[in-house]
Image (cartoon, grey):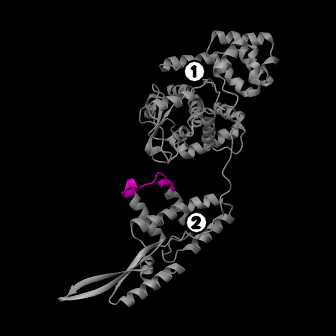
Amino acid sequence: MPTIRERVRRRNGKREIRWQVQVRLAGHGAISKTFDKFADAEAWGREQERKLKLGDTPTERRKELQAMTLKDLIETYYRDREENLHKQKLSYENEKVMLDAFLEQSRSGGKSLADFGQKDLQEYIDRRMKGGVKASTVRRELNPLRHVYKVARRERGIPVPDIFQALYIPPDPPARERRLTRDERHALFEATTKCRGKRQYRLWFSLILAAYCTALRRGELLKLLWADIDFDKRTLLVRAESSKTRRARLLPLERMLCWHLMLYRSLVPEEDKTPSSRVFPISGTAHEQAWKRIVKRAGIEDLHFHDLRHAGATRYDELGLTRSENEYMLGHSGSGTNSKYVHAEMERIRAKLDVGQEDIDLPTNDEQLRREYDSLECIPDELDEIMCAWREKRDINKLSQTEKETIATTYAQNPKFRYFVLRYCTNIGEDKLQDLAAVSTIDRLMSALRPPSNSTSPQVAPRG
């Protein structure tokens, strides 16, 4: 129903009454006009409302829309966001890429806003779907343009209609349910050893382990700075500008992850580990290409980097984190927990993450760290052959008594050897870990470091 207001003005000393009518409809900007007679205002208002409901464009609005093309509207949005940085979304650069791609593929940039409508969008959707593009991809391609239209109506008062309301896009398929198995996890870590150079190997090993242990998103990991990691307090800060939800959170670091990050940092040149330097200096494109090579090298199919986040969330449940603790670690918006886990509660989460890792002593400096790491490299050839045979036989009871004693003796002489043992144990399988009771020293090791039978926590050795 149009809104009609009485407007009184004085002209040449005389009092004149005029009638202003305003028409508002969801999804459309407001239009108004002033008349001398109430009947004219009422008739005009009803006619404009009827046109809007039928999808027609009123004459006054059409003139304004005819003067601006779709490309002009998008470029206006670009200028506004670049002049007002506080309005930019975290995905602004991606938005620009997708909007430019839409203009190129739809070839609609030269059309006026009055001529560009729902029919053009539906033709674009049908053409993309016939080309084999998934419905979810088409929906993501149109979301930036939908946002541009919303901003035009809300912030700039441009009377563009809501042409997205009645579009038909097929529903998305069921949510992805990819599970990372124990064997796949270790094959993935093994594949990082083939990276060029020790630093690249440690970088990718640490990046994958960090994704699994912290369940951070890829963008959060790649924007991580050395200043965000406090090795003394064993905490990791996810800055608000790096987070998808624009909410900062402080996460506890478990001992094993902290050990690996310290080792990786010791291999980084001094100029690359300043507080403002990125921990993982990789671009999104380079990350995607390298990830595909690592997955292919590991012989794993249909594994996305984001699946590590899902695996990490599952691991949190198995380690006994409550629902609110899990949501806090994952950075889910709307959970209302970001202000809760700061002091005592943070220690409780860390204690749960450290289960089975109490015997891991963190080095106090890089020199001590390198000595510990080098001690793992000095494994006798004879013992290395035994361990390889163990992995092939997949049963410690198939080893000779002499071979078992060699393993036990080496462990007794070099406590750090437990990481090397675990490297092979985890490739044997959970059911075979019980066989390790045949060697008393390794049995003590397993009782200290082996997770519960229903746990999928990573048992990966610091040794490469």
Residue 142 highlighted magenta (yes or no): no
Neighbourhood count class around disc 1 (C-alpha, 10 Å): few under 14, some 14–19, many 20 upward: few
Residue 90 highlighted magenta (yes or no): yes
Q: Quadrant of residue 64?
A: bottom left
Relative height, residue 218 to residue 142 (above, below): above
Q: Position of residue 321 (x, y in %)?
A: 58, 35
Please give the count of numbered marks on the rendered protein: 2
Residue receiving disc 1: 358
Dominant secondary structure (helix, strand or loop) of the stretch shown in magenta? helix
Q: Position of residue 178 (x, y in %)?
A: 68, 44
Assign the N terminus to one quadrant of the image.
Answer: bottom left
Q: Nearer the viewer, mark 2 or mark 1?
A: 1
Q: Nearer the viewer, residue 294 or 228?
A: 228
Neighbourhood count class around disc 2 (C-alpha, 10 Å): few under 14, some 14–19, many 20 upward: few
Q: Quadrant of residue 304?
A: top right
Q: Earlier in the sequence, mark 2 or mark 1?
A: 2
Q: Give, as a single range, the part of the protein colored magenta.
A: 82-94
Q: Nearer the viewer, residue 400 or 25?
A: 25
Q: Which residue is drawn at the image coordinates 43% and 61% (left, top)?
A: 78
Q: Is residue 429 visible?
A: no
Q: CA distance from mark 2 to mark 1?
A: 57 Å
- In this rendering, position of residue 72 left or right of residue 14: right
Q: Nearer the viewer, residue 20 or 54?
A: 20
Relative height, residue 341 to residue 72 (above, below): above
Q: Position of residue 413 (x, y in %)?
A: 64, 9
Q: Amino acid at mark 2?
A: Gln
- Mark drawn on residue 10: none
Q: Nearer the viewer, residue 51 or 112?
A: 51
Residue receiving disc 2: 105
- In this rendering, position of residue 132 left or right of residue 51: right
Q: Amino acid at mark 1?
A: Glu
